[in-house]
Amino acid sequence: MSAPTNHWKLGAFVVGTVLLGLTVAVAVTAQSLQLVTVGYTSYFDEAVTGLEVGSPVTFRGVKIGNVSTIEVAPDRRHVEIGYTLGASVLRRLGLAGTGRGKETRIVVPPDLRVQIASTGLSGTKYLQIDFFPADGPPPPALPFPVPANHIPATPSTMKNLEDAVVRAVDQIPGLAQELASVVVRINAILEDVDRRELPAKAVATLDNANRLAATLQEKLEQFPVAELSRSMEATLARVDRVLERLDGKDGVLASAQRSSDALGDVAGPRLAANLEETGRDLREAAVAVRQLAEVLQRDPDMLIKGRAKVRP
């Protein structure tokens, strides 16, 4: 048989558990009451759907407070959001500037802003305090006085995206008008082309060019290239023999040189110099003619086809 239940022990256990719970609750409440917070305000020119009282306020991912109030601003355009920041957290992060306790003031550099952000796919909205590029657009001037504890707001990423889409949509009519003007100009050009019958003229020009090319091809085929080549070879042979007579050991130039030397001995240095210069010119001419003969001998058709293009 089981032992009888001890009601005194059960009652003592229940009473002890209740007292322990009350002690923990009192300790937590006391600690929360000792938490000193500082209130700040920001004004947003956009919808704050999804942001609620109690939503966290973070500084680069570190929670430093909570949203306390969400109201419409005095100009009925902006949304006034109040939030409380823990003084001890601000001091630990190095954001606390002057004052103690509830009089703590955070340091607000020129590039410090508040922005509405969302977490992941859930879309839970919260406020983030962070530094933004100083060269960005300055915060707009508000048409009403702001409190001392105020941090300027910057549009959220979704707001910037919406504004970019709106600007793009606003530009569509202008782009459509420019496109229509371009189409009108293209139509005018095509009409002018048709009016001048440029396609037909172009076709006729191509036909004439084709007939001219065919005629030239026919004439070139009828040209006696072989006979001309044989004639050129015979001519080059005769030129070569003449050059040998001019530039040989017993040729005209050698004879002229010997005559020049003899006359130089008889007539003096001036006449010898003139004859020497004349002989040199004749020799250079003979060399040039020989080079031309060699080129024509290698390519007899050069006089007809012209000099071949030298490839680099």
Image: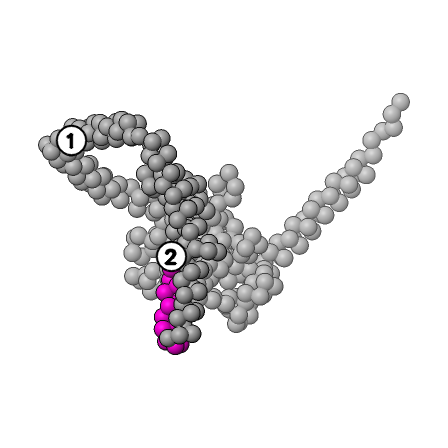
Q: Is residue 106 above or below residue 166?
A: below
Tell me if 163 is positioned left or right of 87 in this view: left
x and y percentages locating residue 61 in the rendered image: 56, 52
Residue shown at 34% from the left, 36% from the top: 231
Task: Give the number of the disc on residue 201.
Answer: 1
**Along the polypeptide, which appears first: circle 1 or circle 2?**
1
> For this rendering, which residue is in front, 143 or 72?
143
Highlighted range, magenta:
268-282
Mark 1 and mark 2: Cα distance apart in space: 54 Å
Residue 198 visible, this orientation: yes
**Residue 272 located within the stretch drawn in magenta:** yes
> For this rendering, which residue is in front, 122 or 276?
276
Q: Is residue 165 above or below residue 58?
A: above
Query: What residue type is disc 1 on?
Result: Lys
**Which quadrant of the structure image shows residue 181?**
top left
> For this rendering, which residue is in front, 26 or 134?
134
Badge 2, how many Cα within 10 Å: few under 14, some, many 20+? few
The residue at which mark 2 appears reads as 285
Query: What residue type is disc 2 on?
Result: Ala
Tell me if 19 is positioned left or right of 200 in this view: right
Residue shown at 49% from the left, 53% from the top: 128
Residue shown at 81% from the left, 39% from the top: 9
**Residue 224 located within the stretch drawn in magenta:** no
